[in-house]
Image (cartoon, coloured by chain):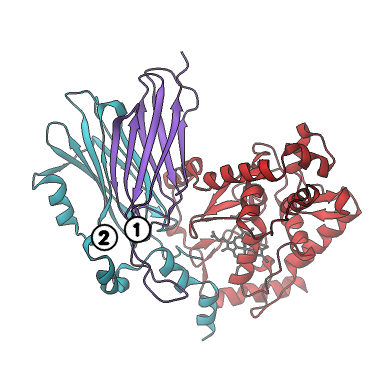
Amino acid sequence: MKTLIKIKPKDYKVGDIVKVDFMAMHPMESGMRKDKDTGQIVPAHYINEVNFLFNDKMLTKMITWESLSVNPVLTISLKVSGAGTLKVLAKDNKGDNVESSVAITPKG
Amino acid sequence: MRKLSMCTALCSLVLCGMLNAEESMSMNAADKAMYAEMLENNPAAMDVAEGEDMFNSLIGKDAYAKVLGVKVKDLPKTIAGFPRMVKVAGKVVTLSQSLQMAAADRGHPVPKLESNEMIKMTAHVKSLANGLETNIDVKADKQMKEMAVLGQHVFEERRGGRGLSCNSCHSPDIVGSRLRMQALPDLGAKETASAATWPAYRMTQSVMVTFDKRMQQCMKNALLAELPLGSKEMVALEVYVTNKGKGNTMQIPGLKR
Amino acid sequence: MERRSFLKGFGAVSACAALVPSIVSAADEAKKVTGPNEMSVESALAAITGGKPVTPSTKVSLSAPEIAENGAVVPVKVSVESPMSANDHVKAIHVLATKNNNVRCANVYLTPANGEASFATRIKLGTTQDVLAIAELSNGTFLSAKQNVKVTIGGCG
């Protein structure tokens, strides 16, 4: 699972509230779609849990479902309390999981 | 004469009951703003990031600039001018083809135009020109002039089972009408900025698609024979359509329906 | 006959089915494969609130397009007015697509460290329907907002 984390805006200070965008390349199969070629139903395959941690402390926990779009994008806010690491752990219903992280580096 | 034939094509669309002016189903300003905001979180950004790694390991800016015969610092404005004549190729090429040349020049296996690797690299390299205006020059040399003429011909030639041409749906007389709910886009207009926004993520397909591939999709939809990627006709078409929207701001990857 | 082939040329039928699964037609077959994920608004609400009342409130703002260009990718943004302090914050934002087979889209559990109660994503909508956002506050109450999203049949091609 490929992922990307973006912090917006790029420059921020301690005390600012920034947006955290998490994107993942994932088919988000609903389990209802028929394969065009085989006619078989494609089994459900979707990201079902995403955890955002700041300096290893839970910031936001998400339970997600197959109604999210293919290649989902999830956006939350973070109040910058200081420098550190924002980590995102994502997991899907087949047990695939991925950890990605980005440095939080406030200016001033 | 041409006018007449275009009208026939148009009428066949109308008779199909597919062309109408469904104003009530078009988006309001707030909806448009929401979709515009989505551009900032384009899933294709992941592809572009991957393309960057691939480009740096396979080619790199120095080697690429050398093949194009320009300085590294001039890469962005050169990139904003594709398709263009590349001396060492001796012909007009698309940006993807120039990457193929650069890969070959470095002794690497040449990625196919339709390969994921090429699509991602193309998106990354084009994105180096983001913020610049497209500056294709169809009068730059004999070869470009020729390609622009051929491109216009391909654009206007009625082919396939329905006798349609690109112009049947994308001529100034018809753009803005709706075909099965979809507004027919003016390919050169700022809002469409066609050449400046592909490769783009197609929301209906959940993948990033290149400009030439997008044109192939139109051919397929309209039952025109598909021109192969990289063929002279396809490159010429890209020249012609890119020139329609010359001066639009590069914004790669785009986000399209 | 003519019309049919034209439609087919546009991939209208096949592409749509692939992208935005038609809930009605596929539901029966889907049951065999993904049974447990089907969930109605009533059951989802009960699971979220434990039967407590949910009050529509202007404190919850939900933005989604009135008309979705494409049912497979519908942007949704939720924000809730809240100081996000230790004593007074939004504990969770739940997003439901009320007519999808499984109405749940995301359950988002926030903390004061978020600084503001906001969540945005993109969802698939199989058909025209209400999108519902529910905010769970730290005092145990539930607020909500909803918006109708029209999904045009042209969501393919």
Q: Quadrant of residue C57?
A: top left
Residue closest to the eye, B26 or C92? C92
Marking on residue B252:
none
The three-letter code of the residue at mark 2 reads Lys
Give the labeled residue for mark 2: C99
Is residue C116 visible in the rendered image? The answer is no
Residue at image point 76% right, 31% down: B73
Does dot 1 land on a helix, a strand or a loop?
Answer: loop
Is residue B199 visible in the rendered image? The answer is yes
Q: Quadrant of residue B221?
A: bottom right
Question: Tag 1, which chain?
Answer: C
Q: CA distance from mark 2 to mark 1?
A: 8 Å
Residue at image point 32% right, 29% down: A56
Question: Tag 2, which chain?
Answer: C
Question: How many residues crowd mark 2 within 10 Å: few (<14), some (14–19), many (20+)?
Answer: some
**Would residue C16 appear left or right of B213 to someone viewing this image?**
left
Give the labeled residue for mark 1: C125
Does dot 2 land on a helix, a strand or a loop?
Answer: loop
Residue closest to the eye, B196 or C27? C27
Residue closest to the eye, A75 or C125? A75
Q: Are marks 2 and 1 in contact (CB under 8 Å)?
A: yes
In percent of width and height, residue C15 lies at: 47, 69
Question: How many residues crowd mark 1 within 10 Å: few (<14), some (14–19), many (20+)?
Answer: many
In percent of width and height, residue B5 lies at: 72, 75
Colour purple, chain: A
Farthest residue toward the bottom?
A: C1
In percent of width and height, residue C157 lies at: 51, 66
Residue A19 drawn above or below residue B32: above
Give the mark, 2 or 1, whose residue is nearer the N terminus: 2
